[in-house]
Amino acid sequence: MGKIVFVDLTHPFSAEIPRWPYFDKPIIDNAHTMAKGGVLTQKITCTMHTGTHCDAPRHVMEIEFDGKRARYTHEMPVDAYTGDAVCLPIEIERWGLIRPKHLEAACEKAGIKPGDLKGMVVCLNTGMHRKFDDSKEYYHYSCGTGIDAGRWFVEKRVKCVAMDMQALDHPLHTAMGNNGMTRMNLIGASGKTISEEYIEQFGEEAYAEFDKFAYIKIYGKEAYTIKFGELEAIGCWGTWEPCHKMMLGHGIVGVENLGGDLDKVSGKRFRFNCFPIRWYMGDGSMARCVAEIDEDDLNEVPDRKYTYGGCI
């Protein structure tokens, strides 16, 4: 047995950090400088959902499944995002929807039974963290989760899910697609919308998973109610970030944009340390995520290098 080491699972923050398509650019300024005041004091203005960060229930919903008001950051237990963890290596195609079969296969590969995930932090390594950049590849064409994965996490009674992707949902389940009041239905690499591109690649039936009205048109209202009705019953748009809401509405918090040296702990069990700011009425918070693990258990992979924003 080797010594305990700490592995950074956080993307580095800067004014040039990649950010979600309609988020503001971080502004970093100095209140004082060494030359003038003898101290360096900096101030930051940015959305708290920038880079590696935590989501609280209030970020995406007004009411949780127990009928109570959705909780803010300060109302979650202090250790809500921290605990015994496992990193599941997810094997899936580009832009694919992560389903229970992918999670079950990842558990087998990591040597853990799904039934043993109760109370644990589950980290997902899809490989997307290696593509973290201001790019369509990272944001538009990421793989991601949906309502089926969300239900799986609830059924397994996990504590927290930390994902190495742009969100706790597939891009087309977010406002990048055709969901939500802020929906953008972004233009993809071909010049067509990403919704059109997805239909061309996977078909209308597969796309319907991400679009309430397309789902009802193809499968019928009854089928939609069976699949998404639990969300609609508490006032949520079923296909709009359903994994977010299924998890958070049942008290399972989430971390987005997990990164750093995640590959060093892929397939491993460790202690996951993550604490958001104790922000009264906060909807989420940037955080430092760190794995605490025996050095003998680390995967032998090179240290992560970042190149965005001119970094080398």
Image (tube, helix red, strand yellow):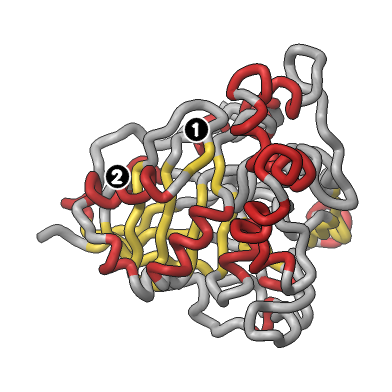
The image quadrant of residue 105 is: top left
Which residue appears at 82% of the width and 54% of the height? 46
Circle 2 residue: 105
Would you say 204 lies left or right of 187 here?
Answer: left
Would you say 301 lies left or right of 53 here?
Answer: left
Which residue appears at 44% of the width and 60% of the height? 152
Quadrant (top left, top right, bottom left, bottom right) of the N terminus: bottom left
Along the viewing direction, whichever of 13 and 119 lies nearer the viewer: 119
Q: What x and y, as percent, mark residue 293?
A: 28, 60
Circle 1 residue: 130
Does 176 appear above or below 282?
above
Which residue appears at 35% of the width and 43% of the height? 89
Labels 2, 1: front one: 2
Three-letter amino acid code at disc 2? Answer: Ala
Along the viewing direction, whichever of 191 and 267 lies nearer the viewer: 191
Mark 1 residue crowding within 10 angstroms, few (<14) / some (14–19) / many (20+): some
Q: For the view shown, which residue lies furthest in the top direction?
A: 190
Three-letter amino acid code at disc 1? Answer: Arg
Q: Secondary structure at mark 2?
A: helix
- Number of the label disc, if any, that sits on residue 103: none
Q: What x and y, as percent, mark residue 31?
A: 88, 60
